[in-house]
Image (cartoon, helix red, strand yellow):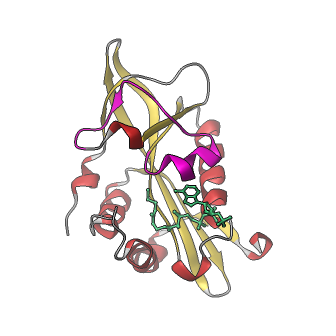
Amino acid sequence: MLESILFRDQTDADTDAVRTLVTAAYHGLPHASGTEPFIMDALWRSGAAAVALVAQDASGLVGQAAFSAVHIFGPDGAGTGWFVLGPLSVRPDRQHQGIGSALIRHGLARLRTRGAAGCLVVGDPGYYGRTGFRVVGGLHVPGIPDRYVQALPFAGLPPTGIIELHEAFSAAE
Ligand SMILES: CC(C)(COP(=O)(O)OP(=O)(O)OC[C@H]1O[C@@H](n2cnc3c(N)ncnc32)[C@H](O)[C@@H]1OP(=O)(O)O)[C@@H](O)C(=O)NCCC(=O)NCCS
């Protein structure tokens, strides 16, 4: 199934299709804010999406994943080289086929080649644990319960401190 899918960088020409995809994937979910399409738009427009991938097949876009830099304010000063995954969307009719996991793996590989320190994610540990993310004590995102905050260090230990996401994550329209 995955063999028929092209994983590639997002381009400006994908903007409308990505918005439609993100809207459809997050629609009506209890953990969704409804702002995810706006967040993705803002990440893309601002250039904050350091890695933005789409998954495409003959029917169009079936998935997307964005990775943006964060600042971590910790006991040892501000941590750099860390990125956060999100939004992550797979078209509802194509979920449970491994596309989301493949997007994560491709994105993590790209971050490694950029020399990143590691990647963070906010979400269900039951899902993200499958690709190596672990809940880290002492790592906080304001307004988010710590049990959803996970890290995957590429070397060494995960950071501690307060994560500041890009301002695009506050986009509401
Ligand atoms: C989350 C999402 C990106 C996953 O994409 P996907 O392509 O369906 O994921 P994969 O096929 O790689 O993996 C799905 C597997 O993970 C498992 N899984 C999903 N959530 C899980 C969880 N919370 N705990 C344990 N396993 C979980 C599923 O059981 C599934 O396995 P199965 O196919 O054997 O049933 C997709 O469901 C989606 O777009 N959801 C809506 C948007 C969203 O919630 N994004 C993430 C926000 S944090």
> Which quadrant would the N terminus be assigned to in this image?
bottom right
Q: Residue at x 63, y 70 (%)?
A: 96
Picture coordinates of residue 35 (x, y %)?
A: 27, 66
Which quarter is ligand 1 in?
A: bottom right
**Measured along the vertical axis of the image, is residue 78 above or below residue 173?**
above
- Above/below status of 62 relative to 161: below
Residue at 56% over, 53% down: 127
- Give the extent of the magenta segment: 122-143
Q: Quadrant of the C terminus?
A: bottom left
What is the tally of numbered marks visible in this picture? 0
Residue 104 drawn in magenta: no
Rendered image quadrant of residue 32: bottom left
Q: Name the foreground residue: 165 vs 43.
A: 165
Q: Is residue 70 left or right of residue 168?
A: right
Q: Residue at x 62, y 40 (%)?
A: 132
Residue 25 spot, x, y in % from top left: 45, 74
Q: What x and y, as percent, mark residue 78?
A: 33, 21
Which residue: 30% across, 38% down? 141
Residue 165 vertical position relative to residue 156 in the rendered view, above or below: below
Q: Quadrant of residue 46?
A: bottom left
In the rendered image, residue 81, in percent from the top left (x then y), is placed at 47, 30
Q: Nearer the viewer, residue 1 or 123?
A: 123
Q: Quadrant of residue 28?
A: bottom left
